[in-house]
Amino acid sequence: MCAADDYLPDLDVRVIAFSLRKEHLHVLLAAVPGAGLEIPAARVGVSQPLEEAASSQLYRLTGLRETYLEQLYTYGETLGRPGARLVSVVYFALVPAPLAARENHASSMQQDALQADWFPLVSLPTLAREHAEILAYALRRLRYKLEYSAVGFQLLPEAFTLSELQRIYEMILGETLDKRNFRRRILQAGIIEPTALLRGGEGRPARLYRYRPDAVAEVKTRRLFP
Amino acid sequence: MCAADDYLPDLDVRVIAFSLRKEHLHVLLAAVPGAGLEIPAARVGVSQPLEEAASSQLYRLTGLRETYLEQLYTYGETLGRPGARLVSVVYFALVPAPLAARENHASSMQQDALQADWFPLVSLPTLAREHAEILAYALRRLRYKLEYSAVGFQLLPEAFTLSELQRIYEMILGETLDKRNFRRRILQAGIIEPTALLRGGEGRPARLYRYRPDAVAEVKTRRLFP
DNA sequence: ATAATAGTGTCTCTCAGACATTATTTA
DNA sequence: TAAATAATGTCTGAGAGACACTATTAT
């Protein structure tokens, strides 16, 4: 035991990763022996920046870099033993939907190493400690962010159709949107642009769009108050 | 030295307190011997919730409870020595403007105990380490929050005139607002209500308003994207 | 009476929201 | 040719933003 222990609670970094799989929003959760399902955690190395710890944890989990990652909140979790403290800096991440081909491939291999897996947000199992509340807060923030920023694209592969994009918005917001209004507004915003490609399938082929890398991600929200 | 030290950076809680003094926005800063001016910090007690540590720090600094307090961000600060880490959970607080009578009274007594004092945001002295950036971020968040929530009232005493309220908005947003539009919108929002009182002075006396305690603090922002 | 501050109404233009039909493909 | 999905335009109502004068008090 160390004298300073009184004031040095344990510290880790956790990542809530959202992704679309099979038309539903999923989260990445880790099965921790003896504790149940948790938001996956990682220790922070000496003189390792917090965000980098989160980012390399996300790489370990998904095999992806350069995904959207943002600090969410810092929780002082109460563990079972009295006096024991765990401070978790929680990040949330948006992981692009996999192309159909690699869906059960490279990424799941990475996950197995940490016993992490994707769970659909509808019909979620019981989580450890306060993790259900933390996750609920992350989802609220995601919904809220979707309303004033362009963050939705981070959940899609590089090229996507407007119908796919609309379905994402509907899925996260939990309501249906008018097709014409949706297209008008999303195109006016000037953050996506058409490509020369079409995607075939059942019905008329759809034009593929892509996110404009030069576009400002955050749109200035109209001030309303006052 | 303890074996776990590698993974247990030092942890504290800091509070950025904004307040209006003499027609300018001020911040509370502490002079730390050997380190210069800092955002005031407090240790977190064993099994003390983070927010409570911040809230009692704010009480120590200002003598006030029940002020607006919100978690801002968690920084891993780099100290001088290599390998040394300090993780700070930073909160920001809005402290009501003092009534003219008690301006240099009870509250400054409390501050002296911790060598903390109010500094105007215009013409700010040099701060320790990364604290200037952290403060700039807090100010951005305050501006942003002002645009979609009712948080501005937290900087005023219980009763205030519409002109005073408008000056707060102008001061924080750094732009002038139209008087008639301001009044129309703030009254339509239904979060303040007139009292029976007037405040005299030079010129026509102004009606006093107060924040409606039953009002929803956060107004739903019109979705814009898309 | 003059200086200082409080208080009040209208018009225009933009944009969100509601709404139905045609176009192109595969089976 | 039927079924499936993509693509497109207009009208209306609400509200943001621009704008100038009258009212009430102290000096």
Image (cartoon, coloured by chain):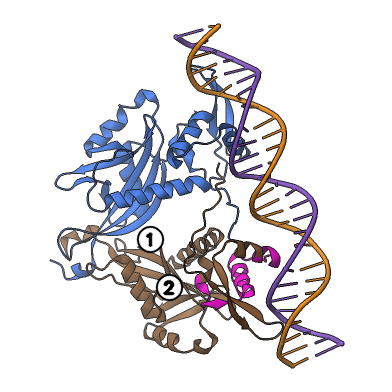
Chain colours: A blue, B brown, C purple, D orange
Please tell me which residue is depicted at 30% across the width and 27% down the height of the picture: A105
| Marks 2/1: CA–CA distance | 23 Å
**Which residue is labeled 1 in the image?**
B75
Amino acid tagged 2: Thr
The answer to if B153 sits in the magenta stretch is no
Left/right of residue A30 with respect to residue C15 in the rendered view: left
Quarter of the image with the N terminus of chain B is: bottom left
User: Residue A59 versus residue B154: which sits nearer the camera?
Assistant: B154
User: Residue D12 versus residue B134: which sits nearer the camera?
Assistant: D12
Left/right of residue A153 with respect to residue A10 in the rendered view: right
Location of residue B98 in the rendering, given as x and y in whole percent from the top left corner: 51, 82
**Which residue is labeled 2 in the image?**
B67
The crowd level at tag 1 (other Cα within 10 Å; few <14, some 14-19, many 20+) is some
Q: What element carries label 1?
A: strand
**Image-quadrant location for residue B192:** bottom right
Q: For the residues carrying marks 2 and 1, which lies nearer the camera in this image?
A: 2
